[in-house]
Image (cartoon, rainbow, N blue to C red):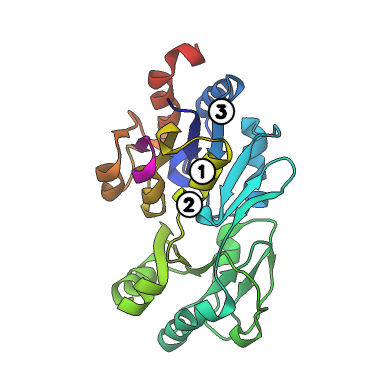
């Protein structure tokens, strides 16, 4: 029995213009009011998506969000941490050396702010993120020695194509590398994935992955799509996501694909 709905944002719940359609909002609100857990799953910090959380009404004491692609599970109301994991400064040494040798930018994020690495090529991540999060340019050697959520390369899509093509076996072993957007490549802990945070949240409620429905479109959604009792790929999703999914939405993200699928599955609860 499905008790939790997990939703990627970009090109899944969101239209291409970064808005949520009225149909998606209304359908998810009805299910939430009927007792379904609705959980946004994103690589961003919660402050960056607070407008979406409020719009959907996910502001009751039992509401949570999966942020930093699974590394942080946070309560929407209290902002208290349910689960947190990540990487240390030394874990990025291999990645920094690769970026330095090839002239690539790099941003390293903890759970409060972003550190654009100042001794590397400038990044466009701040302009792309457009979030109320502090950006503190810092040389790699001077990074604080505490826990980090991930690293990001943000640059032209063609440059990231080159990065992906030249990743060494050591880099692939050290990090879980995902292309979350055409201009954003993320480097997570090797075992980190949205499914990790969702598994911790499901356990919190005494449930398991058979109780989860997950929607996604891109490479960083694959883990939760595969793990969910019902993994749903967007009609506009990447081929590998569609291949891994149990179902596809009848329409694309810009045509309220999430809502159209939910209305078919939960017709009695919605109407």
* Disc 1 and disc 2 in contact, CB within 8 angstroms: no
Q: Where is residue 38 in the image (x, y as percent from the top left)?
A: 55, 33
Q: In this view, does 64 lie above or below 177?
A: above
Q: Percent position (x, y) of residue 202?
A: 52, 40
Q: Residue at x 29, y 73 (%)?
A: 165
What residue is shown with label 3? Answer: 25
> Mark 1 or 3 closer to N-term?
1
Dot placed on the residue nearer the N-terminal end, 1 or 2 = 1
| Crowdedness near tag 3: few (<14), some (14–19) or many (≥20) residues, C-alpha within 10 Å | some
Q: Position of residue 21 (x, y in %)?
A: 52, 31
Relative side of 171 to 44, left or right: left
Residue located 38% across and 19% down the image: 264
Is residue 207 within the magenta segment? no
**Magenta part of the protein: which range?**
226-233
Position in image of residue 242 (x %, y %) = 28, 42
Q: Name the residue under label 1.
A: 17
């Amino acid at each position: 029995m499905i008790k939790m709905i997990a939703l990627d944002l970009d090109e899944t719940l969101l239209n291409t213009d970064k808005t949520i359609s009225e149909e998606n909002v209304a359908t998810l609100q009805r299910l939430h009011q009927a007792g379904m857990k609705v959980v946004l799953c994103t690589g961003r910090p919660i402050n960056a998506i607070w407008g979406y959380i409020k719009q959907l009404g996910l502001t009751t004491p039992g509401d949570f969000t999966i942020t930093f692609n699974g590394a942080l599970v946070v309560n929407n109301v209290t902002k208290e941490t349910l689960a947190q994991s990540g990487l240390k400064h030394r874990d990025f040494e291999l990645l920094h050396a690769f970026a330095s040798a090839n002239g690539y930018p790099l941003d390293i994020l903890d759970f409060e702010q972003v550190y654009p690495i100042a001794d590397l090529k400038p990044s466009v991540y701040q302009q792309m993120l457009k979030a109320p999060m502090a950006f503190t340019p810092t040389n790699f050697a001077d990074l604080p020695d505490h826990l980090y959520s991930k690293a990001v390369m943000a640059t032209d899509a063609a440059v990231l194509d080159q990065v992906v093509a030249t990743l060494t076996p050591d880099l692939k072993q050290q990090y879980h590398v995902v292309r979350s957007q055409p201009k954003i490549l993320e480097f997570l802990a090797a075992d980190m994935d949205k499914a990790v945070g969702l598994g911790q949240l499901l356990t919190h409620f005494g449930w398991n992955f058979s109780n989860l429905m997950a929607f996604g479109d891109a490479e960083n959604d694959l883990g939760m799509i595969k793990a969910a009792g019902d993994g749903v790929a967007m009609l506009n999703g990447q081929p590998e996501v569609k291949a891994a999914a149990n179902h596809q939405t009848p329409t694309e993200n810009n045509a309220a694909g999430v809502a159209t699928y939910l209305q078919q599955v939960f017709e009695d609860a919605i109407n």
